[in-house]
Image (cartoon, rainbow, N blue to C red):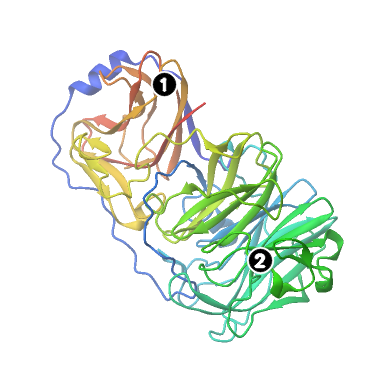
Amino acid sequence: MSLKRTVAATAIAGVAVAASLLSGLSPATATPASKPATTPSATPTPTPSVTPGTGKTPVTVVEKLTGPDAPNNTWGRWDIKGTDLGILWDDGDGRVLAAFGDTFGNAFTGPGGGAGPNGNWRSNVLTRSSDHDLSDGMLFESAPQSPQGIAKQLIPSKKINGDEITTIPTAAVSVGKRQYLGFMSVKQWGDPGLWDTNYAGIAYSDDDGENWTVSPTTWPNNAAGDDPFQMQAYVRKGGYVYVYGTPNGRTGAAHVARVPERKLLEKSAYRYWNGHAWVTDESAAAAVVDAPVSELSVQYDAYSKRYLMMTLSGPDIVLRTATSPQGTWSAPQLVASAADYPGLYGGYIHPWSKDGVISFTMSQWSPYNVYLMRMQIDRQGRIVNPNLVANPSFERADAIGDGTNGTWACTPNCGIDTAPASSFSGDHNAFVRYNQGWRNLSQDVSVQPGTKYRLTGYIRTSANSDNGYFGARTTAGVVLSEAHFVSVGPWTRFTVDVDSGANSTIQVYAGVWTNSGDIWLQLDDVAVIRR
């Protein structure tokens, strides 16, 4: 798949190389490679809560799906420079469709959503994918386009604040040859995590998402602004579509209804779970998950024989499981912490996830784009095989130290870039910069002896870089496996397979070694998982 940008390495015989690298530690005189942050423009979309969680993120970043530096080149192909959500569903004809929320084009500056005049603001867009190999990303092949050749808005919106500022997709499902897209009509954005909706609606398409018709079927918000089905998620199972709902904003509880799959547009056919039975009265619907939950994604998983519910809960994305669509739902498991991925939200499960490997989309307010993420569950739906790297995205305050007080050590000049536009994800990345000699970032990682692991990370360098390395070594400096690179332009994913051998600790590292003048390397989103 030519659009996917990744570099893989197998074991390299590198003992002699490692010795030469570790011997040349001449001090550098260059200054850190930070880049200035861009100035945010007017924002018609909500800013999320920024209060970080404290748990360690077990999942890993696979690929940036949208925006600058994304292998899909959504900016160049369809003028999708900034966007969010990425709601995924199987179209029933060999493709997965992805619906995005507020989308901005060439004038988008970020970080955060919004663009000024001529920002080509569309409330919603869609892409298509037939990519079954999600281990290295998700390739988009097409998008519904306007006559100008850009991704077109699917569902109209007035774009009038206080009336209808936008229309945001929240759920989707295919029944037969028809695609159904649930959306919310947003009246106005409020404080972080709060907004007001007019109603939840359904649009449908009979040409694989190319054109959409808005149906008259709606769930109007009530006077109190707490109707429980303003944001929805769909699961098709056993002849029904189960419809999970939350109120507007990010502070409500989750409820569930069901409808015969061929009657999605018939409001009278819906039945609401009241805690004991399915009833006709929406007002009798009982909470199946207590607040706060928002931005639901629910899917039946054949591997664990459980329903998986991924939600935003407070600042973090969490996972709950249940053996029936109405629950009882398990306690939440941390999927992604805002301490590692500030401003995260979304969390929409890929329908082709299988064999316990769960792929999903995750949005970040900065850089206001969408990432493909990966995690693994066991037969009981428990998250297993977590990322063993501490502070993988360099967002936590103790990112760089001397190897004892910080999670990462480095050979100066080195540190943290804090300009959001510079990073692969979030606001921070690590860097080394030098004039001559060996400069590297490293972390000691506890592993099981005699076990195979996969190391991944995102790297970019200055154009004159000519001798870079990313890999794993023993604490004595003996290389176990590494990738060698020269100049790396856009952020690129490197993959290195490592056998721990007799070691219970390995040291992961990224560095450069040369005498060619001022050279820098940036590193972000590092992971070590068991193969």
Query: Could you tell me if the residues under marks 1 and 2 are in contact, i.e. CB atoms within 8 Å?
Result: no
Q: For residue 30, what is the image quadrant?
A: top left
**Percent coordinates x, y for residue 376 in the rendering:** 56, 37
Viewer-side residue, 292 vs 498: 292
Q: Is residue 379 visible?
A: yes
Q: Is residue 149 visible?
A: no
Residue linked to disc 2: 286
**Percent coordinates x, y for residue 525 in the rendering:** 40, 42
x 49%, y 58%: residue: 313
x 79%, y 50%: residue: 92
Disc 1 residue crowd, few under 14, some 14–19, many 20+, Cα 10 Å: some
**Percent coordinates x, y for residue 60 in the rendering:** 48, 41
Give the amino acid at mark 2.
Answer: Ala
Give the amino acid at mark 1.
Answer: Gln
Alpha-carbon span between mark 1 and mark 2: 46 Å
At numbered mark 1, what does the secondary structure look like: helix, strand or loop? Answer: loop
> Is 113 on the left-hand or right-hand side of 290?
left
For marks 1 and 2, the one nearer the N-term is 2
Viewer-side residue, 94 vs 357: 357
At numbered mark 2, what does the secondary structure look like: helix, strand or loop? Answer: loop
**Percent coordinates x, y for residue 215 in the rendering:** 78, 74
Residue 371 versus residue 112 in the image, above or below: above
Residue 205 versus residue 58 in the image, above or below: below
Kindly report which numbered mark, 1 or 2, lies closer to the viewer in this rendering.
Answer: 2
Residue linked to disc 1: 448
